[in-house]
Image (cartoon, helix red, strand yellow):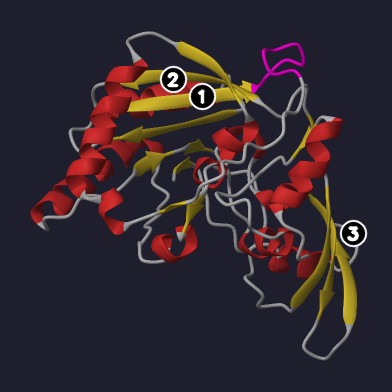
C-alpha cells in the first residue's frame, strides 16, 4: 500500500501500461488512493480509482486481516474504497492497469472566451478523448485541454529518462502573487492560438508538471493553499461558477487556478464523491 505512483508508472510505462486513474502528485501512495478514491482528469472515461481495484487486504482494529473484493467481504470492500481509513488499515492493493500504446500523450489545447463556452467544449471533448478538463482566468477566458495516449510511433516512441537539471529552484510565495498568476494566464491563453493545437508531451510533464521540474519546497508551499472542490449538476454549473467568481471578487480574493472536469456517475461505492456533473 505504500508504493508510490511514481514507482508504479516507472515500472509499468516501459511495458506500455499506465494507471487508469491517477492523482495530482506522483508521491501519492496506492493505499492513499484507495482510501481517498479520487477521480482523475479522465473521469468521464474511467470513473474513480475504486473501479480499477480488484481486491485489497485490510487490517481491522481487532488485528484481523481480511481480503476484500467484489466477491469476498463485498460490503467492507465498498466501504473501504473512499472511506479514508474508517474501516481499518489498508495493507495491500491489487490494481488493474490499462494497456496503452505509449505512456506519453497527444495533447490538444483549445481556448474559449466565456465560461459557458468552456463548459460545453470540455464536455464535448470528454466524450471523445481519454482526458479532458478546462481552466479559466479571472476574466472568464480559458483553455480546454484534451488528450489521449500517443501512438507507439509518435515523436516520443521510446521512454526517455526523466530529465534532471543540476540546479534546484526553491518555490517562493511571490510566484503566486495575483498579478503574476493573472499575467501567466493571459500569456497561456494567447499562446494557445485560435485553433486545435496538438503536441506530443512526455507523461511526467502532462500528469505531474510541478514534479517534472527541480523545484524544492513544493509540499511546504502547497500546504499553505486551500482547495475547494464541488460537484455541480450540468444544468446549473455555469451559474454556480459565475456566482463563485462574483463572491471571490467581492472578497478581494483571486484563485491561483480554477479548473473544471466533466464527469458522470458510475462508481457505485458507498463514500464516493463525484456524481453526475462537473467537479
> Earlier along the polypeptide chain: callout 1 or callout 3?
3
Please determine whether, in this image, residue 86 is positioned above or below residue 153. below
* Magenta segment includes 152: yes
Q: Which residue is mark 2?
A: 109
Q: Which disc number belongs to residue 146?
A: 1
For image coordinates 68% across by 19% down, the residue present is 150
**Residue 206: percent from left, percent from top:** 56, 33
Residue, far bottom:
62
For image coordinates 64% across by 69% down, the residue present is 83
| SS state under label 2 | strand
Answer yes or no: do the residues labelled 2 and 1 have beta carbons within 8 Å?
yes
**Residue 1: percent from left, percent from top:** 78, 65
| SS state under label 1 | strand
* Label 3 neighbour load within 10 Å: few <14, some 14-19, many 20+: few
Determine the CA span between mark 1 and mark 3: 36 Å
Q: Which residue is mark 3?
A: 71
Please determine whether, in this image, residue 223 is positioned above or below residue 10. below
> Earlier along the polypeptide chain: callout 2 or callout 1?
2
In magenta, the rendered stretch is 149-157
Determine the CA span between mark 3 and mark 2: 42 Å
Amino acid at each position: 500500500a505504500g508504493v508510490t505512483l511514481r514507482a508504479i508508472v516507472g515500472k509499468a510505462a516501459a511495458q506500455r501500461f499506465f494507471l487508469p486513474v491517477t492523482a495530482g502528485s506522483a508521491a501519492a501512495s496506492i493505499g492513499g488512493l484507495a482510501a481517498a478514491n479520487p477521480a482523475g482528469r479522465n473521469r468521464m472515461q474511467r470513473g474513480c480509482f475504486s473501479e480499477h481495484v480488484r481486491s485489497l487486504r485490510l487490517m481491522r482494529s481487532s488485528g484481523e486481516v481480511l481480503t476484500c473484493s467484489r466477491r469476498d467481504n463485498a460490503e467492507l470492500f465498498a466501504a473501504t474504497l473512499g472511506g479514508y481509513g474508517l474501516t481499518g488499515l489498508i495493507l495491500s492493493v491489487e490494481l488493474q492497469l490499462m494497456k496503452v500504446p505509449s505512456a506519453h500523450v497527444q495533447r490538444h489545447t483549445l481556448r474559449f472566451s466565456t465560461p459557458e463556452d468552456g463548459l460545453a467544449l470540455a464536455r464535448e471533448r470528454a466524450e471523445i478523448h481519454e482526458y479532458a478538463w478546462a481552466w479559466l482566468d479571472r476574466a472568464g477566458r480559458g483553455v480546454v485541454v484534451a488528450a489521449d495516449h500517443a501512438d507507439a510511433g509518435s515523436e516520443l516512441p521510446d521512454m526517455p529518462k526523466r530529465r534532471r537539471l543540476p540546479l534546484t529552484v526553491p518555490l517562493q510565495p511571490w510566484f503566486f502573487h495575483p498579478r503574476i498568476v493573472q499575467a501567466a494566464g493571459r500569456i497561456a491563453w494567447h499562446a494557445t492560438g485560435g485553433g486545435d493545437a496538438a503536441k506530443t508531451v512526455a507523461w511526467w510533464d502532462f500528469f505531474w508538471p510541478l514534479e517534472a521540474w527541480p523545484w524544492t519546497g513544493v509540499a511546504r508551499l502547497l500546504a499553505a493553499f486551500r482547495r475547494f472542490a464541488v460537484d455541480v449538476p450540468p444544468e446549473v454549473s455555469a451559474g454556480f461558477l459565475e456566482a463563485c467568481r462574483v463572491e471571490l471578487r467581492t472578497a478581494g480574493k483571486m484563485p491561483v487556478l480554477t479548473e473544471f472536469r466533466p464527469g458522470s456517475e458510475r462508481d457505485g461505492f458507498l463514500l464516493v464523491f463525484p456524481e453526475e456533473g462537473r467537479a
